[in-house]
Amino acid sequence: MDEEHQAKPSKAAKPVVVGEDLSRTSEDELRERITLLEAEITRTRGVLSERGNIRSAADSLFKSENS
């Protein structure tokens, strides 16, 4: 896997739990949470894009064989 798609967790970062209560979370912790979530979204989009490229290549290969 590409280095750009690997998560680089912060030493002090705790796992992000979707839907957890954030009422006692500090502003700094909220900013860190947003940074982690944005990095994960970027990583996930990269993997999705790679899969789309692989699917397109496979579709092209099979279409050309059947033509």
Image: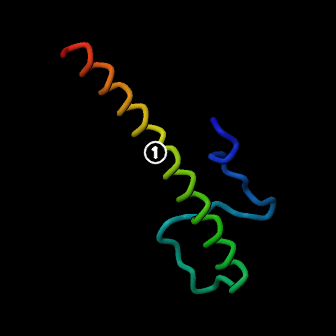
How packed is label 1: few (under 14 Cα within 10 Å), some, or many (20 or more)? few
Name the one closer to the observer, 23 or 51: 51
Question: Where, by quadrant of the figure, is residue 51 drawn?
Answer: top left
**Is 34 situated above or below 51?**
below
Question: Where, by quadrant of the figure, is residue 66 drawn?
Answer: top left
Give the side of residue 66 with respect to residue 25, left or right. Answer: left
Name the one closer to the observer, 59 or 25: 59
In what element is the residue under mark 1?
Answer: helix
Q: Name the kind of residue labelled 1 in the image.
A: Ser
Q: Residue furthest left?
A: 67
**Is 14 situated above or below 66?**
below
Give the side of residue 60 with respect to residue 52, left or right. Answer: left
Give the side of residue 11 with respect to residue 66, left or right. Answer: right
Question: Where, by quadrant of the figure, is residue 42 drawn?
Answer: bottom right
Q: Residue furthest top?
A: 65
Write the residue at 57% across / 52% down.
43
Write the residue at 49% across / 52% down.
45
**Which residue is label 1 attached to?**
49
Q: Position of residue 38 (x, y in %)?
A: 58, 65
Name the one closer to the observer, 58 or 21: 58
Write the residue at 38% across / 28% down.
57
**Is 36 situated above or below 48?**
below
Q: Position of residue 56 (x, y in %)?
A: 35, 33
Q: Residue furthest right?
A: 11
Q: Position of residue 5 (x, y in %)?
A: 62, 46
**Is 52 situated above or below 37?**
above
Quadrant in which the C terminus is drawn: top left
Quadrant in which the N terminus is drawn: top right
